Image (cartoon, helix red, strand yellow):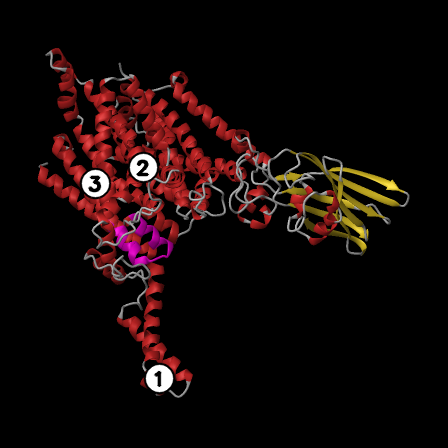
Amino acid sequence: MSFSSKTIWKEFSHSKIGIVGIAILVILFSMSIVAFVTIPLDSFKTWNDPASWLLYPKSAQPAWVNYFQSEKIPEHLILSPVVSSQQLDSVSVLTNSFLVNYQYDGFPSDFIYQYTVKYSGSPLLQVSVTRPDGIVLPLVSTSLPFAKDDTTYSSMIFSTQDVIAKNILDKKTRYAFSLDGISSEKIIFSKLDENTILKGTYVFQVRLYDVSEKPVLSKSNLILGGKVYGIMGTDELRRDLSVGLLWGTPLALFIGITVSIGSVVFGLVYGVYAGYKGRATDEVLMRFNDIIYAMPALPLLIILAVTIGNSIFLMVGFLVIFGWVGIAKVSRSMALQIKTLQYVEASKLMGQKDYKIIFKHILPQLLPYAFASIAISVPGAITTEAGLSFLGLGDPTFPTWGQILHDASSYSAAARGMWWWILPPGIMIAVTGLAFVFMGQAMDGIINPKLRQR
Amino acid sequence: MGFKKFLAKRAITMFGVLMATLLVTIILVGSNMDSISKQSAALEIRQQVTNNKNLLSSFKTSEQLDSYIENQIKQRITALGLDQPWYSPQRIGLSMYKILTLDFGHAKFLTSDSGSSDVKDIILEKLPRTILLFTTATAIVSVLGIFLGTVAASKVNSKIDRITSGLAIISSSFPVWWIGVLMIFVFAFLYPIFPARATPDVSISDPGYLGSLLYHMALPLITLVIIGFGSWAYLVRNFLVGVLQEDFIMAKRAAGIDEKRILYSHALKNAAPPIVTILALSLSGSLGGAIITEAVFDWPGMGRLYFEAISVLDLPVIIGATYVLTAFFLVSVFVADVLYGYFDPRVRRE
């Protein structure tokens, strides 16, 4: 029954699945660190705020699907500018150029130029595009609203605006087909002889002319609308799923590990105390244990979530309430065996206090079992939380994997073939569960050598 | 301790658990339930007064009317015993007595397919469907699992053993409902073989109802079997491996008894108590899990009823369904206990 931590680790390192489990866990932990470092806490808080996802495409597939297709689906591009500025006599010119090598087999769905500018006076804003064939199409030429003092002005230019259509119509003689009823982006990105996509490098240039002072573009992004985006795609609410999936990792680990540690510690102390005390204490404690053990967990969890609350911390508490019972039963029977050992009886005779015997002599003996149970009970906690979230009873402020799947099912992602919305969260849940199951299996093999026989 | 005394003791514990669960449920939903019943009493009075033209014309001012209505509502609330706080022992006792006698009251929003709003009718309509789906699934899973587990145990570390163990570990970490969503995605939309919604689309009176029900049951059934039989086989395998190391098996081998016979008649018989226990427990466990599974497949059973009741907060239905689910759960725990005690007399003497 007794193990030293060294021999356990030695045995553990010989077990292949144990190592695989640890490897997956290390990957998951590094993903959590990446989530904390790269994705600012703000964007995770704005997960449910539609305004913060306006620039993203709706229900876009992951960008890498293009590798498996001969016909490349246009990617949703959020471009950042190359900035240069020059002085022409008294006029200062600020130029932002957006360079895009467009190699997709379809027109962009639209384009949006989003900017924030600091200026005084009334600068002139000009947008033009240079096509791969050298033709320059002026798109917009507008003066910003006059301001006496320094002001900050934010606005957007949409490809659907009439000005753009009008400006392009001036060049209609170059095109061999009628431009009537064709939207601007389909003209800009079109070949001259027929209305199909012209591949190559396009340069969008934004120029800001001002006489009085140098204006500053503090925000300047060109968005080319497309149907694929990022590593994980986006959902119906334009949210970047990679952000949600990445943030789901620390959340799942937090839920799984806190619930299992909480249940195991409580169950262990409860069971050992009952087993050590024996008699009436044992009887009362174990009958109470029986009652909780026989309660149907999921219906009661649902009622608790509905009536008391569904914050993620409350959820952890609820899951612990139903998680500790099995462990208490096993640790009680283990304590019953240990307390008859001679050294325990000896220390009892020497007048050692009860809690000292429990914490010094009995609990340490149960540690290997405790670690194995922690590992084994993590997947259950994660899947139960995910299940509750999937039913819509989870904490909606956190993008847990179950929450993402809940959104997917409420927008009937399965019916619309949005596999990138359904598959990754479930796989993440399963992989996280597997890591702990593997580790638990490896530890189980050490504690119960019987299972490895022959 | 005799078998009868053992049975009696278990039965009393189970009844205690049933009461405890009921009490917890009533306490949890009590305050909401209270305000809902008060509101419905007030609404009823208001309707009665406004429908009664003679009574309405006898009031001169609207203040008089209001004070009359207020009075009536107060009287009704006292008559119904709602003037006591919801946590008063009388009211909790009364609600528990009502539920014990299967008087769940009327649902606020939900109705049964035949239109009744009596919670008892609704539950009696949904329960058989859940039992049909989950009992069939458990039966298939256990037969498959016992067979595979026995084969795996007879050839420890062989390919089939490794595959079984691997399957068990992997399938246990996938949530059943996610596999369900996936199955719907693949077999209802990508390759439309099965219907996406498991609710049969013909009425109960139609002669083709049973066929339609079975056809709609196929996808959830397949999912439950796929996700379940691996871990079953693994459990059976582990029990059998333990039994096969016992001395009496050695003795049988030494006596030259056929290995197959040892495995199927002697070893399996000795591994039976834990297997039967887990069979009963998994049956009841799947009833609880039915809530999510049925919500995914839209199977019109207890689980979906529960889910719908929670989404509209139909408290009488929630309480009734919790009671029935708990009762079923406890009956199967009880049966498991009894079977265990029957197969393994040591338990009775503990």
In the depicted structure, whether residue A177 falls above or below residue A103: below
The residue closer to the viewer here, A346 or B67, is B67
- Label 3 or label 2, whichever lies nearer to me, is 2
How crowded pointer 2 is (Cα within 10 Å; few <14, some 14-19, many 20+) is rated as many
The residue closer to the viewer here, B340 or A67, is A67
> Which residue is tagged 2?
B223
User: Where's residue A55, x and y in %?
Assistant: 61, 45
> Which residue is tagged 3?
B333
Dot 1 and dot 3 residues touching (CB under 8 Å): no
Point 33% across, 63% down: residue: B34
Do badges 2 and 1 share one subunit?
yes
Point 23% across, 54% down: residue: B204
In the depicted structure, whether residue B337 falls above or below residue A368: below
Do badges 3 and 2 share one subunit?
yes
Left or right, A79 with respect to B139, comes to right
Please state the extent of the stretch shown in magenta in the rendering: B303-324
> Which residue is tagged 1?
B56
Magenta stretch: residue A58 in it? no
Element under disc 3: helix
Dot 2 and dot 1 residues touching (CB under 8 Å): no
- Which part of the image, by quadrant, shows the C terminus of chain A? top left
Report the chain holding disc 3: B
Element under disc 1: helix
User: Where's residue A41, x and y in %?
Assistant: 57, 41
- Label 2 or label 1, whichever lies nearer to me, is 2
Residue at far right of view: A89
Earlier-in-chain disc, 3 versus 2: 2
The residue closer to the viewer here, B78 or B315, is B315
Report the chain holding disc 1: B
User: Where's residue B271, x and y in %?
Assistant: 18, 26
Left or right, B220 with respect to A200, comes to left
- Label 1 or label 3, whichever lies nearer to me, is 1
